[in-house]
Image (spheres, rainbow, N blue to C red):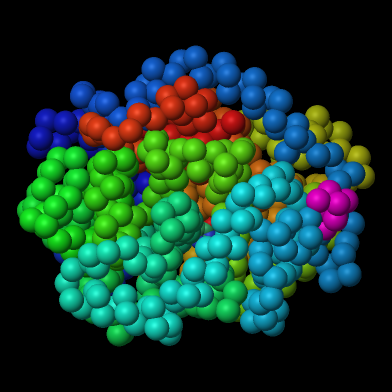
Amino acid sequence: MEMSGVSAASGVPVIKLVEDPVEAVAAEPPWATKREKPRRCRQALLVIGLVTLPLVLFLVLGQESAATVWLQIATAKLTATNGRGFEDANHGHDDGAATGATAAANADELLGGLLAPGMDRGSCLSRYDSWRYYKHFPYAPSPHLLRRLRDYEARHRRCAPGTPLYAKAVEQLRSGRSADDTVECNYVVWLPFDGLGNRMLSMVSGFLYALLTDRVFLAALPPDSDDLFCEPFPGTTWRLPADDFPVAKLFGVGQHPDRSYSSLLDKKKIAVPEDDPAASNATAPVPPAYVYLSLGWLLTDRIFFCGEHQLAIKKVNWLLQYSDLYFAPSLYAVAEFQDELRRLFPAKESVSHLLTRYLLHPTNSVWGIVTTYYRSNLAPADRRIGVQIRMYGHSSIPADDMYNQILACSRQERILPAETDSGDGNNNGTTTTAILIASLYADYYKRLRSRYAARGAAVGVFQPTHEERQATESLVHNRKALAEIYLLSFSEELLTSGLSTFGYVASSLAGVRPAILLTAFDHKVPATPCRRAVSMEPCNLTPPRDVECRGEAVDKDDLARHVRVCEDWKDGVKFFD
Ligand code: GDP
């Protein structure tokens, strides 16, 4: 992402975040519309003005005092999740996977019931195999989450493409209006937007929303993502049959679609019950059959996160979700969802960790890449450290400075081993370490490899690929990217890049609180090289602002206890405990 501007025509200060300029030119997805700004641009409103959404209120008021609390919690909890010594490290599994004592004790192949039994193993090996590779199992799913997931799966089977209820729902969609009465099958259709990390986070968020609202989650997968993820739900499909779907524009709708929720509200095609008393009687507008939810970085439909609008949205049978964000923390600011989220996830830090492990399983073609690479390069070591370096044009600094920042972060958080046997690093003696570098470029891999050349077999440095540019439109490229996210997630310890959803997903999957490199805004090397994350949760980079909600009041104390400013982005929020 790149920071490339601080003002807008409206006079509202804006930060634009733009990723690698090279990629910005080269990697425009084929479905992007001309109307949309280059997708590398992301903006977050800085002026809060009349903000009244409780989430943001707490974000601002609680920021200072939060810092101390974070430090305390971080110190206490890191011991629990990341502080495992080398003795935990894997010493080999039959098939070369790294299970380790902790894994064996705390996990089973269905991840404590998180995954439903009864799926065909051969069709999705990763589903049954991944537990052998993860090093951390910090959170068991709550009984309530397990119940809700099993109920969800049963509903999905009843309503999925190919069923009579799906056919009926599509007929209703063709009619142009939502059903008058309550129907069993209502849907959230996930649409692709932005890079793989963004997509995985928006999938998890959309699935959570479907879970909270008793909807069915379907994915409209473009060719570049066709063979990345297995079917997640037993005995059914999550794939939207896009060819037969009676909505013409599924891909590249952009962030201002005509039928976004807010624009339909402006056009009075939909009504909020409390705004329009007529909405509850026969003269009220009949809710349209579908609306786009424009929940990308511009957050066009930010009112989505208000309870009163949820009442209106509830009446729409089909929701088409266009988002590149992890918006789960913003759902916690909606009173109607807060209680249920508390029951589903007693530990807020576990939301993305559990849902990503539940929902997203690499297909066999990706899993083959992952396991082959792991066994050859990473499994033999006692300990694995993942280092993810994402570079953005807006925050570019000379490579020497960046390298020094990585080393300074490592010293601060005691991550990488010492350069020499006699050094003061945290990994002396007889343990062997594999350092996995994930980056589009080879530079830092080469530097670290020569740094550790003198350590011989004690420290290995590996980089599976260096693709040089983002190519989201390519399935082959995305397979490699997904494989690297999973390889990172099999690390005992992670050092990731700020603002990167790629790194966020790897950390959540790993169950690790990473050390997050701070971004060099304005091309200035940050004084603090990195911060240890207070939770493994992804940052919600664009939470709703400038919204006045009128719905039921949320429990603000609880909100303040569990949603805080991100370590790497002061305008973002994340879950923590
Ligand atoms: P973000 O831009 O860092 O938030 O992450 P995204 O995953 O949404 O988009 C970046 C995309 O660039 C990835 O999906 C990949 O296509 C590519 N990419 C970035 N870093 C890496 C990397 O370390 N390895 C590989 N293979 N691809 C990468």
Question: Where in the figure is residue 331, as x and y percent of width and height?
Answer: 41, 42
Residue 469 visible, this angle: no
Residue 292 against residue 164 in the figure, above or below: above
Classify residue 220 by image quadrant: bottom left
The residue at 86%/46% (across/down) is 88
Question: Where in the figure is residue 117, as x and y percent of width and height?
Answer: 70, 71
- Kindly give the residue lying farthest to the right in the view shown: 430
The residue at 66%/67% (across/down) is 116
The residue at 30%/51% (across/down) is 295
Say whether residue 97 is left or right of residue 202: right
Say whether residue 231 is left or right of residue 76: left
Say whether residue 270 is left or right of residue 459: left
Q: Is 355 colored magenta in this rendering?
A: no
**In this picture, which residue range is highlighted in magenta?**
99-106
Say whether residue 497 is left or right of residue 490: left
Q: Main secondary structure of the magenta part?
A: helix
Classify residue 38 by image quadrant: bottom left
The residue at 28%/70% (across/down) is 251
Of residues 193 and 556, the one drawn nearer to the viewer in this rendering? 556
Residue 527 against residue 533 in the figure, above or below: above
Question: Where in the figure is residue 292, as x and y percent of width and height?
Answer: 25, 60
Question: Where in the figure is residue 313, as x and y percent of width and height?
Answer: 27, 53
Of residues 170 and 485, the one drawn nearer to the viewer in this rendering? 170
Q: Is 104 colored magenta in this rendering?
A: yes
Residue 211 against residue 351 in the figure, above or below: below
